[in-house]
Amino acid sequence: MRALGIGIFVGLICAQTALADPVHGTWQSPKNEDGASLQVTLSACGTEVCGVITKVLNSNPAVEGRRMIWGMKSGGNGSYTGGRVWAPDEDKTYRGKLELSGGTLKVSGCVLGGAICRGSTFRRVN
């Protein structure tokens, strides 16, 4: 009976790992003109994907712990839409989109019905 319980426990852990969204993990932004960059950890927020700034490199750490990405829903094939992206350099929130391709993640967003858009490509840290 104990062996059966251990087997079920191990099976559940393996199933959870298999169901983890491929975008989950830590991603690093490219360096800006001052050499600063961010690390953002993406994880599940209910059925959506959210991201929190977990590390600031070569800049003011005041934004560490702040939510940067929220409300993203998987559209399949590595695309995520329907959420928001906060740009700390401008303190503005954009309607966001994520596009996963191997070890890179394009984070982009638009305002004013798509009239003003910007984005950058993050690389996977882990």
Image (cartoon, rainbow, N blue to C red):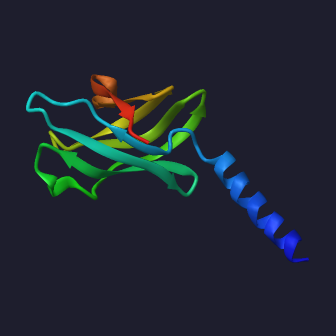
Q: Is residue 112 left or right of residue 101?
A: left
Q: Is residue 20 above or below residue 99?
A: below
Q: Quadrant of the C terminus?
A: top left
Residue at 39% x, 48% y: name it.
41
Q: Is residue 1 above or below residue 76?
A: below
**How many numbered discs?**
0
Q: Is residue 106 above or below residue 84?
A: above
Q: Is residue 78 above or below residue 72?
A: above
> Residue 5: x, y in percent?
83, 72
Res 110 → quadrant: top left
Residue at 34% x, 46% y: name it.
40
Q: Residue furthest left?
A: 34
Q: Quadrant of the N terminus?
A: bottom right
Q: Residue furthest front?
A: 3
Res 106 → quadrant: top left
> Residue 112: x, y in percent?
28, 30
> Residue 58: x, y in percent?
12, 43
> Residue 107: x, y in percent?
36, 32
In the image shown, does 42 or 46 lie closer to the viewer?
Answer: 42
In the image shown, does 58 or 44 lie closer to the viewer?
Answer: 58
Q: Residue furthest right?
A: 1
Residue at 48% x, 51% y: name it.
43
Q: Is residue 121 left or right of residue 23?
A: left
Q: Is residue 125 left or right of residue 61?
A: right
